[in-house]
Amino acid sequence: MGSLARALETFFTGYGMAMATDQAERLAAGRRQRRIDAVPETLRPSVDAFADFMMRSRERARRAGTRPRSDGTIEAALAIMRDLARFLAGERGKQD
């Protein structure tokens, strides 16, 4: 989505003339998936399970009315897990 489309979306949704798109959510999901895909194959299921846990926790926080984790926080945690998994697989020879 370009800058003009974002500006129009903001204007029309602000005045209740249109519903917001899920563009930001789709982009965040793509970023999360790229971080998971960068994890070595043997450790990927564990990182994928961690990502699912983070997303379930965020939804639970939203339902409870507490402060949910932002996309940036979840993506940072996944980047740390990716780097740790690469280190463990490459430097330490850990496969699980």
Image (cartoon, helix red, strand yellow):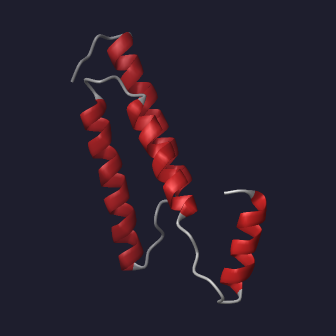
Q: How many marks?
A: 0
Which quadrant, please, contains the C terminus?
A: top left
Quadrant for residue 38, please give it.
top left
Residue 61 versus residue 91 in the image, above or below: below
Give coordinates of residue 36: x percent, y percent: 39, 36
Quadrant for residue 39, please give it.
top left
Q: Of residues 1 and 72, which is closer to you in this image?
A: 1
Residue 86 versus residue 28 in the image, above or below: above
Residue 17 versus residue 33 in the image, above or below: below
Q: Residue at x 44, y 74 (%)?
A: 66
Q: Is residue 55 left or right of residue 24?
A: left
Q: Residue at x 52, y 52 (%)?
A: 28
Residue 11 versus residue 72 in the image, above or below: below
Q: Is residue 15 left or right of residue 91?
A: right
Q: Is residue 6 left or right of residue 88?
A: right
Q: Residue at x 25, y 23 (%)?
A: 42
Q: Is residue 24 left or right of residue 47?
A: right
In this view, the residue farthest toward the bottom is: 16
Give coordinates of residue 24: x percent, y percent: 57, 60
Q: Residue at x 51, y 44 (%)?
A: 31
Give coordinates of residue 1: x percent, y percent: 66, 57
Give coordinates of residue 41: x percent, y percent: 29, 24
Quadrant for residue 19, please give it.
bottom right
